[in-house]
């Protein structure tokens, strides 16, 4: 019979995780991914029978702390908590993404850690965190390790999380003071919509108004969201006012979008290009033609 | 920490395992498994059924509750996380000042229609108002964005939420009006339980000892299946009671709308025809049924090649889906008038095109649910439905019982839009309850609802239209193939209605409209708000834009020149005698049209990658069945003890017939609305009012209600020798009749009574006069028609192919608006569904079978709507009224497509115009130019 485990310390949680047999424990935080999967399976008479590890009562996984050294986001921080947190403008992209996930009901319950572990190609939390150079902190009884986010989210529903590990927190290094960011989401309706494509961009400038740092990530256009490294490198040293014109289709060559019910691959590739340009235009302070 | 072993949990709370929390301020403790969904626990264990379940996946927000003062979908919350928390549900709302004010505001604004989303909406709104009692529009939309509504188009909900502060500390709901009730914005008579959460929908009640039923459905579009040892399977699983298959059906194992087309099996017999077809039903205790694994079930599938789409079913060598239709063409429809070739030959301008639409899901927020209970040699069915009498007939046939042995008790219906006209779970529930002689209940999941239920017909339409040099229409020809899916359902109705309407509300002398309903291995296509007319209108209105342009005419002027008017003859050869208000609608739209065109021109004057466009669409819609009888009978009684009762068999699925018909009856009788007791849609107690479809209840049942009340009034006047202008009053058991200062009195208590206490009664019937169509489609298909014209203004992002609607202006000739607030609600809701049809809705079996992948408009997708009500009275209608339900939807998508073309120069001929489809059209155009 399936068990429901709700530890109140990380130690207990790790012990349970380590004791699990061949089938790893199903991790549960906000429930916003776990229960829809159950619903889908149950419709076709595939009852859910895995043991559940509810991480919601583990204090070590919660909270958002920010200081000069960087930012720690607990894995069970909700979208709403992120949206309301006092964080510098480099986090605006993450906050904007937080307000566009599902409806308020989902934002109040869904967690950033769950979003990363669920590893949907369209996860709205991933591009902003990729742009922030975030690392994930993973813990097991074997020890702690940190991975760059790009090495954690590996593909569609695939992560580097080991069966005995728990994602404890996301660490974001200190951001340049001048860093500003934005997140653009493209969907076929206003609310409750999965991204057809998404873009997060962070730009920092030096005293002369030249780009000193550029970090751009695209979501829903590859098995895992991707940073556009070649483009980023080319933007360094450019005047921040006119970056959009520097973006070329080849800059998005690494994307591998798919055809699905939401859009065609060709459209996604082109939309991502448009959105990257718009994100840069927006960060340059130019008026936007229209939000995506 | 706590570790729960679910096997050790009993139904009652053990002290150690109990999960304790506060529900609406009261302490509760329960022994449910901690991973049980809060929604399920609230409803099943705590009896708090005000919280509704629409999807169990966080996609619809119907189950929104507050947990520690923050809104959440209760379907996603394990109750193990609720220990020690505060949960507020709709049942607790009235005890808060803000909640009570919100409930009042919902009533006053008509913000609840079917009411199934209302508890979730109220909770989301309460969450907002607690933080900001006077929120702005954007903030309100953000707060409500997670709750889907399929009826209202959201506008009245947003108004009610923003206006709720005015109802703090009380406020009044209009439940009675001075003078005539007709024409007043009366609050829904059935509104109070909807805002309180006490309304009983199909899943909200069942006998305590009811067993649970779940259907096993085919996962393939076509398959053969073989069953193993079902008895052994059941015997090995405590709690399972029985598996029902085709062999267990006492009567006929089939159902269908048309008497000669009972082609859909209750339980499949060897070969299935669509993904979602019911093969058998498992009945038992809830936990046992829920625990079933398909892997262990003794069924083996052999998938077979399937015909997907009309073209496949018509192709050379296609197999035959049903033996009685070797060529897979279920029905043909035809309307032919004049000489269409001669018409085209004399034309100055000709336009033609091919148009495609896909399956559209009704997406009512209430999945099908109900129970059946055997009482001796009769059976009762409590379930959501649009057609209780048709349900009765189907169930009687399946059980092999006389009609009077079947009683249908319609539950409150959480949306229908045509999808609850067909039986769904009624036949299998009836079979199980009959055979087992135990109550049996069933609640479809969202996915089961979507895979099994009917859809809007996909269409492939080739059409050609022509006008003379002055822009007068001369000829129209269309051929439309409608994918009716695996079973007939309402396919013949669609094939019949389309040719009649396909030329739109215009004078066209030479017409040939041909339609076919084609069997395929798709889901059964049935009735969906408009019966094929929205699909046909997309083609026709698009071609008329072409003609207007070719003739050098403004698009609205072109329509005005050609508008059909009273005295004109339709392509079916019917002379419209009265109440043809399209021209008036267009005249009323003119200033809006010119203003919006000027606005678009000004906007587009600046170079930019966003272009603004304005489009117009018109429609007509025949009210009631096509060329066949569709009567309604109503009854109004006074009883010995002074009760005034309206026996109304029309089912209110949210559109408002309970309120509207009572308003009509009240004015015809001469007593106020609030004096009426209502007996609604119970096949044992009310007369057959016909189905709630075809926009017919206001018109047809309205006339019957008027006649019934007038008959009672005539009886009262006769007894008192009073004249027609006498004023009635009901006090206790006496009716007073005042005329010219003379007051006569009838003592009801002194009159001889029928068995049910009735002493005076009026019964009224109405069957709209029609003449069946002949082989050329000539006749009088409908007694009256609704007319409308709508304008859409929108912005297109040329780079992304995305569309933002700015405004819709809707002018509707409704004959007479019995209750303008409810009429507006129908128009808002129809427009929202039209937006969905135009821009986002596409049901793909196996791919968009949930409300996560199948997108319907949210609160942020419906723009401001201006409504102009044109009242060109219909002499046959009650106080001149016609229907509005379907007319609201038909012109929206054509107006949107016209606006896209106006903005961009590209002509979408396939809906939905998803961003990537529009982007492809735009790219092709830019590649050319």
Image (cartoon, coloured by chain):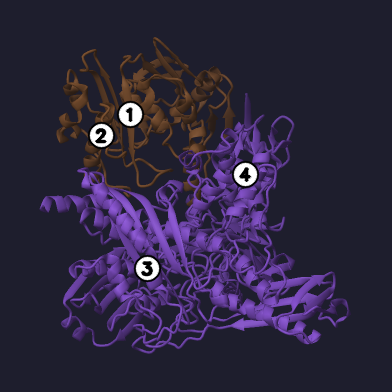
Left or right, residue B627 beside residue B8: left
Residue wearing tag 3: B587
Measured Cα–Cα span from mark 2 to mark 1: 10 Å
Residue in the picture at 35% in, 43% down: A187
- Expressed as whole percent of the image width and height from the top left, the position of residue B226 reads 45, 63
Measured Cα–Cα span from mark 1 to mark 4: 38 Å
Measured Cα–Cα span from mark 3 to mark 2: 42 Å
- Expressed as whole percent of the image width and height from the top left, the position of residue B929 reads 11, 52
Q: Nearer the viewer, residue B488 or B837?
A: B837
Residue wearing tag 4: B166
- In the rendering, which numbered label is found on residue A278? 2
Q: Secondary structure at mark 4?
A: helix
Q: Nearer the viewer, mark 3 or mark 2?
A: 3
Which colour is chain A painted?
brown
Residue wearing tag 1: A182
Residue in the picture at 31% in, 16% down: A178
Q: Nearer the viewer, mark 4 or mark 2?
A: 4
Q: Secondary structure at mark 3?
A: helix
Label 2 chain ID: A
User: Which quadrant holds the N terminus of chain B?
Assistant: top right
Q: Is residue B256 visible?
A: yes
Q: Nearer the viewer, mark 4 or mark 3?
A: 3
Q: Nearer the viewer, mark 3 or mark 1?
A: 3
- Expressed as whole percent of the image width and height from the top left, the position of residue B610 reads 25, 45
Q: Residue furthest front?
A: B740
Label 4 chain ID: B
Q: Which chain is purple?
A: B
């Amino acid at each position: 019979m399936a068990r429901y485990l709700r530890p109140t310390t990380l130690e207990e949680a790790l012990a349970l995780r380590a004791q699990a047999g061949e089938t790893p424990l199903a991790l549960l935080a906000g429930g916003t991914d776990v229960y829809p999967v159950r619903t889908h399976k149950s419709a076709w008479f595939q009852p859910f029978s895995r043991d559940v590890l509810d991480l919601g009562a583990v204090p070590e996984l919660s909270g958002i702390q920010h200081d000069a050294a960087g930012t720690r986001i607990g894995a069970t921080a909700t979208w709403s908590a992120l949206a309301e947190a006092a964080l510098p403008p480099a986090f605006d992209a993450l906050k904007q993404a937080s307000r566009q996930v599902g409806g308020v009901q989902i934002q109040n319950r869904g967690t950033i850690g769950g979003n990363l572990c669920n590893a949907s190609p369209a996860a709205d939390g991933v591009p902003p965190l990729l742009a922030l150079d975030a690392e994930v902190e993973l813990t097991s009884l074997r020890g702690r390790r940190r991975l760059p986010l790009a090495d954690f989210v590996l593909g569609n529903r695939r992560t580097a999380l080991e069966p005995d590990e728990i994602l404890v927190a996301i660490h974001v290094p200190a951001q340049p003071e001048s860093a500003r960011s934005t997140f653009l989401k493209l969907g076929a309706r206003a609310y409750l919509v999965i991204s057809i494509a998404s873009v997060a961009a962070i730009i920092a400038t030096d005293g002369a108004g030249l780009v000193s740092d550029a970090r751009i990530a695209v979501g829903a256009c590859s098995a895992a969201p991707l940073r556009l490294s070649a483009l980023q490198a080319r933007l360094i040293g450019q005047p921040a006012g006119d970056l959009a014109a520097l973006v070329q289709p080849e800059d998005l060559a690494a994307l591998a979008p798919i055809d699905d019910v939401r859009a065609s691959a060709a459209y996604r590739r082109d939309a991502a290009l448009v959105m990257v340009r718009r994100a840069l235009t927006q960060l340059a302070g130019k008026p936007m033609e229209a939000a995506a | 920490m706590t570790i729960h072993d679910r096997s050790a949990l009993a139904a009652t709370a053990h002290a150690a395992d109990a999960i304790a929390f506060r529900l609406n301020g009261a302490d509760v403790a329960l022994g449910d498994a901690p991973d049980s969904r809060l929604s399920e626990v609230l409803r099943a264990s705590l009896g708090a059924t005000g919280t509704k379940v629409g999807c169990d996946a966080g996609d619809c927000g119907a189950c929104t509750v507050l947990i520690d003062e923050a809104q959440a979908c209760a379907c996603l919350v394990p109750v193990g996380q609720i220990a020690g928390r505060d949960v507020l549900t709709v049942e607790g709302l009235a005890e808060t000042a803000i909640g009570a004010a919100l409930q009042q505001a919902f009533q006053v604004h008509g913000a609840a229609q079917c009411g199934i989303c209302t508890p979730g909406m109220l909770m989301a709104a309460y969450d907002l108002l607690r933080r900001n009692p006077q929120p702005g529009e954007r903030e309100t939309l953000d707060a409500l964005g997670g709750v889907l509504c399929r009826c209202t188009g959201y506008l009245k909900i947003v108004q009610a939420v923003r206006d709720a502060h005015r109802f703090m500390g009380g406020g009044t709901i209009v439940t009675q009006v001075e003078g005539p009730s007709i024409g007043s914005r009366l609050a829904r008579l059935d509104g109070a339980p909807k805002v309180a959460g006490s309304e009983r929908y199909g899943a909200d009640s069942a006998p305590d000892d009811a067993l649970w039923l779940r259907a096993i459905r085919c996962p393939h579009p076509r398959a053969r299946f073989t069953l193993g040892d079902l008895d052994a399977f059941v015997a090995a699983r405590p709690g399972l009671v029985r598996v029902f298959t085709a062999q267990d059906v006492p009567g006929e194992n089939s159902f269908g709308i048309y008497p000669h087309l009972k082609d859909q099996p209750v339980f499949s017999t060897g070969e299935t025809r669509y993904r979602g077809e019911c093969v058998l039903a498992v009945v038992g205790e809830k936990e046992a049924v829920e625990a079933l694994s398909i892997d262990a079930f003794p069924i083996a599938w052999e998938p077979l090649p399937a015909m997907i789409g009309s073209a496949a079913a018509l192709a050379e060598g296609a197999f035959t889906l049903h033996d009685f239709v070797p060529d897979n063409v279920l029905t043909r429809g035809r309307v032919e008038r004049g000489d269409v070739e001669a018409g085209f030959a004399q034309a100055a301008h000709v336009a033609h095109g091919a148009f495609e639409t896909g399956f559209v899901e009704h997406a009512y927020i209430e999945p099908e649910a109900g129970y059946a209970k055997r009482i001796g040699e009769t059976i009762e069915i409590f379930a959501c439905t649009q057609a209780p009498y048709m349900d009765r007939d189907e169930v009687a046939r399946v059980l092999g019982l006389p009609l009077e042995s079947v009683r249908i008790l319609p539950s409150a219906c959480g949306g229908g839009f045509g999808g609850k006209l067909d039986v769904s779970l009624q036949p299998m529930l009836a079979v199980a309850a009959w055979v087992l002689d135990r109550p049996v209940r069933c609640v479809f999941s969202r996915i089961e609802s979507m895979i099994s239920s009917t859809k809007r017909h996909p269409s492939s339409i080739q059409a050609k239209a022509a006008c003379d040099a002055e822009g007068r229409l001369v000829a129209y020809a269309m051929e439309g193939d409608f994918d009716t899916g695996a079973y007939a359902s309402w396919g013949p109705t669609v094939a019949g209605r389309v040719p009649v309407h396909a030329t739109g509300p215009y004078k066209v002398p030479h017409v040939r409209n041909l339609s076919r309903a084609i069997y395929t291995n798709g889901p059964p296509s049935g009735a969906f708000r408009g019966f094929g007319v929205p699909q046909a209108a997309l083609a026709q209105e698009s071609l008329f834009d072409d003609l207007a342009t070719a003739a050098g005419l403004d698009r609205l002027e072109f329509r005005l020149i050609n508008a059909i008017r009273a005295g004109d003859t339709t392509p079916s050869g019917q002379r419209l005698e009265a109440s043809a208000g399209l021209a008036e609608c267009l005249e009323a739209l003119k200033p809006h049209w010119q203003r919006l065109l000027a606005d678009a021109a000004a906007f587009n004057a600046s170079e930019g990658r966003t272009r603004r466009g304005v489009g117009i669409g018109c429609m007509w819609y025949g009210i009631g069945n096509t060329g066949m009888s569709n009567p309604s009978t109503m009854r109004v009684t006074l009883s010995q003890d002074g009760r005034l009762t309206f026996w109304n068999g029309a089912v209110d699925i949210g559109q408002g017939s309970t309120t509207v018909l009572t308003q009509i009856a009240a004015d015809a009788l001469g007593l106020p609305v609030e004096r009426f007791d209502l007996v609604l849609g119970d096949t044992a107690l009310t007369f057959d009012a016909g189905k709630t479809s075809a926009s017919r209840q206001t018109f047809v049942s309205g006339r019957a209600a008027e006649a019934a009340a007038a008959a009672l009034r005539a009886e009262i006047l006769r007894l008192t020798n009073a004249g027609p202008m006498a004023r009635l009053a009901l006090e206790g058991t006496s009716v007073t009749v005042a005329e010219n200062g003379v007051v006569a009195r009838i003592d009801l208590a002194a009159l001889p009574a029928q068995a049910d206490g009735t002493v005076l009664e009026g019964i009224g019937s109405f069957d709209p006069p029609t003449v069946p169509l002949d082989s050329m489609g000539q006749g009088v298909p409908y007694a009256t028609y609704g007319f409308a014209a709508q304008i859409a203004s929108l912005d297109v992002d040329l780079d992304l192919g995305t569309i933002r609607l700015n405004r819709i202006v809707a002018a509707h000739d409704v004959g007479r608006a019995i209750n303008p607030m409810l009429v507006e609600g129908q128009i808002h809701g129809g427009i929202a569904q039209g937006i969905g049809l135009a821009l986002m809705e596409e049901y793909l079996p196996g791919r968009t079978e949930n409300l996560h992948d199948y997108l319907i408009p949210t609160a942020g997708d419906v723009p401001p709507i201006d409504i102009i009500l044109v009242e060109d009275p219909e002499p046959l209608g009650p106080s001149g009224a016609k229907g509005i339900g379907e007319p609201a939807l038909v012109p929206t998508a054509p107006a949107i497509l016209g606006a896209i073309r106006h903005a961009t120069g590209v002509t979408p001929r396939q809906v939905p115009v998803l961003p990537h489809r529009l982007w492809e059209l735009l790219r092709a155009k830019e590649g050319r130019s």
